[in-house]
């Protein structure tokens, strides 16, 4: 199995088992999990310490703890080319948990990223996180950022120094 997409019912996602992911860890290159309300630390650790061939990961609308998100950001394979963390929230809450430390860890860990989606209405990206993206992720072609209201427009203009960036959403 090379590609696996799992669409969860956000209200009833407590029965999620990562067995199909782990048993295909040597061939799996694309993993998309959508609307899983309770992505546990144990599951994330199992996936991202075993699936080292992943080139594309999407965890759109998933819920997890800050510890889980931090572990993932610090342990993703550096082969990742596409990453979607759109609307990552805390367990059972609507609080968005993506922070500066996560973005910096991703930028340092995954320099080959070509597509990055950090969107979500309530998320905010910091000036430091944006600077790290500009400095470390020179291969980005597509990028969606959350609210950039705290960043001066002149800092946003620095995105034009990214040679491959063609699509940018805020």
Image (cartoon, rainbow, N blue to C red):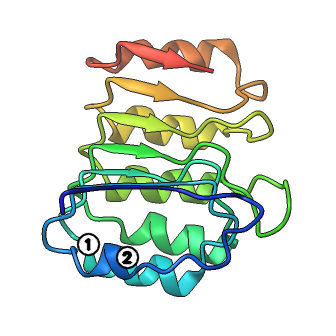
Most extreme residue toward the left is: 27
Q: Which residue is mark 2?
A: 47
Taking 128 as reference, is 111 left or right?
left
Taking 90 as reference, is 125 left or right?
left
Where does residue 94 sit, x and y in percent of width and height? 85, 54
Q: Which residue is mark 1?
A: 51
Task: Look at the numbered discs 1 and 2 and tell me whether their residues touch, using CB distance below 8 Å.
Answer: yes
Taking 168 as reference, is 14 left or right?
right
The C terminus lies in quadrant: top right
Assign a secondary structure to mark 1: loop
Where does residue 148 sit, x and y in percent of width and height? 70, 26
Q: Tell me: residue 34, above or below residue 27.
A: above
Question: Is 7 in front, or is 149?
Answer: 7
The span from disc 1 to disc 2 (Cα, nearest Å) is: 6 Å
Question: Is 57 in front, or is 72?
Answer: 57
Q: What crowding class fits label 1: few (fewer than 14 Cα within 10 Å), some (14-19), or many (20 or more)?
A: many
Q: What crowding class fits label 2: few (fewer than 14 Cα within 10 Å), some (14-19), or many (20 or more)?
A: many
Where does residue 110 sit, x and y in percent of width and height? 31, 53
Which labelled disc corresponds to residue 169? Answer: none
Assign a secondary structure to mark 2: helix
Where does residue 155 sit, x and y in percent of width and height? 59, 20
Q: Going 33% across and 75% down the picture, which residue do you hit? A: 20
Question: Is 90 in front, or is 10?
Answer: 10
Q: Tell me: residue 134, above or below residue 101.
A: above
Q: Going 77% across and 70% down the picture, which residue do you hit? A: 91
Q: Going 13% across and 66% down the picture, which residue do you hit? A: 27
Q: Tell me: residue 132, above or below residue 152.
A: below
Q: Tell me: residue 29, above or below residue 130.
A: below
- State the image quarter where residue 1 is shown: bottom left
């Amino acid at each position: 199995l090379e590609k696996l997409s799992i669409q969860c019912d956000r209200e009833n996602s407590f029965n999620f088992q990562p067995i199909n992911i782990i048993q295909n860890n040597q061939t799996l290159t694309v993993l998309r999990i959508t609307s899983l309300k309770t992505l546990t630390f144990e599951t994330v650790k199992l996936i991202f310490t075993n699936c080292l061939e992943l080139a594309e990961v999407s965890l759109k609308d998933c819920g997890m703890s800050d510890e889980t998100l931090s572990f993932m950001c610090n342990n993703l394979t550096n082969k990742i080319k596409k990453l979607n963390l759109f609307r990552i929230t805390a367990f059972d809450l609507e609080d968005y948990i993506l922070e500066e430390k996560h973005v910096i860890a991703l930028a340092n860990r995954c320099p080959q990223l070509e597509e990055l989606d950090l969107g979500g209405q309530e998320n905010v990206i910091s000036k430091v996180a944006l600077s790290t993206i500009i400095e470390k992720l020179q291969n980005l072609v597509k990028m969606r950022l959350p609210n950039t209201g705290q960043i001066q427009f002149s800092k946003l203009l620095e995105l034009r120094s990214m040679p491959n960036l063609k699509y940018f959403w805020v």
